[in-house]
Amino acid sequence: MCNDDETRDGIERRDFLRVMGVAAAGGLAGSAVASPAAAATEAPAVAAAAAAAPTPLGAYAMPWDPADPAIPGRQSLVPVPEDYFVPNRFAGKTALVTGCARGMGRIAAIRLAREGANVVGVDWLADEGQAVVDAINAEGLKAVFVEGDISETAVCDAMVKAAVDSFGGLDCALNNAGVMDAIFPGDPIDYASQKDLVMSRIDEATDAYWDVVMRVNATGTFRSLRAELRQMLAQGRGGSIVNVASVAGLRGFGGTPSYVASKHAVNGLTKNAAIDYAPYGIRVNSVCMGTTVTPMYERAFELLGQRARSGFKDTGVGMAKVKSLLEMSNQQGRGSTPAEQVAVMLFLLSPESSNLTGANYATDGGFTTY
């Protein structure tokens, strides 16, 4: 049996994470949380096997088991395999991925390389980011790593320079790096000592929380775009850029003012850039995911759990709606996987999406539909 505090704690953490789409910030890991050391050890062997023959796509959906007596024929969607890729789709092209150390950025970097791209990975988690690039190179594919914070102009200039120096130019970029709070992603969570760095209502929010999240998410995306676009203009051969926003950039969410504001800024920058650079053959889109199962999900789960146990209370209004259409339709109530998000990102980066620009795509399992 759980006491009331434990029950409230669990509900708050579960519902908050479902609503927030926490994986919209970059530098995340895959659907299973693994240590950097384990990922570095296992990645080359797994990647080499996957590169030899991509896992084929399966059925669209599978029946509930056991069946739902209330809705006969009910189905759960089958997610795209994490090691699926499209051979040669990016052959001869160079792709830049910020936030490459974990989660969506990690999977995107590996999949881009398997699809033929030369990859420039960027992250402020140096060891983990380098491990991803090392795993790519161990497959016989091509990648280089740039360490740094994308909110710094020098880092953004350096990552584009690395693409030019190593591979002769830049064709596409995934601006995935971002944060949800002001705690450095490599640091352990301790709510009691980090209260001033985590999400809170506007009247309780600190400058430290606001400034870091806005600097990384909004300013970092702007400075990344600026460096990438300058290079693409100089090359004169077009290109494609995808910015990682969030469902929080399409609507409001309680208790996270800096995150919501910064992701709206990312979507605004996307539209602005699409207008200015369409005449040069450069397309710019954004993706806006809902709950995506990553280590940032686990991190936020831990943080919100500690906050609940501290006696924190809110009005509950922000939890009035917590599930997407696909979460409600899935037997396990799962959110999306990083691989499902990356599949859309890479389509938008590829020449296949030649007619698409200036859109903020709700890759949220239908959350914003109703």
Image (cartoon, rainbow, N blue to C red):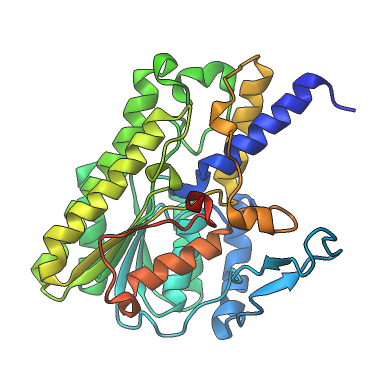
- The percent coordinates of residue 246 (x first, y second) are 42, 48
User: Quadrant of residue 68 in the image?
Assistant: bottom right
Q: Which quarter shows the N terminus? A: top right
- The percent coordinates of residue 281 (x first, y second) are 16, 72
Q: Is residue 277 visible?
A: yes
User: Which residue is rendered at x = 55% and y = 27% of the image?
Assistant: 317
Query: Left of 58 or right of it: where is 347?
Result: left
Query: Left of 222 or right of it: where is 184?
Result: right
- The percent coordinates of residue 225 (x first, y second) are 22, 54
User: Quadrant of residue 67 in the image?
Assistant: bottom right
Which residue is nearer to you in this view: 265 or 142?
A: 265
Which residue is nearer to you in this view: 184 or 369?
A: 369
Q: Is residue 280 above or below residue 322?
A: below
Q: Residue furthest right?
A: 1
Count of labels in the image:
0
Q: Is residue 158 above or below residue 137?
A: above
Q: Is residue 4 above or below residue 285?
A: above
Which residue is nearer to you in this view: 210 or 318?
A: 318
- The percent coordinates of residue 318 (x first, y second) are 54, 30
Query: Left of 198 or right of it: where is 116?
Result: left
Q: Is residue 306 above or below residue 157?
A: above
User: Which residue is rendered at x = 25% and y = 40% of the image?
Assistant: 219
User: Which residue is rendered at x = 81% and y = 58% of the image?
Assistant: 70
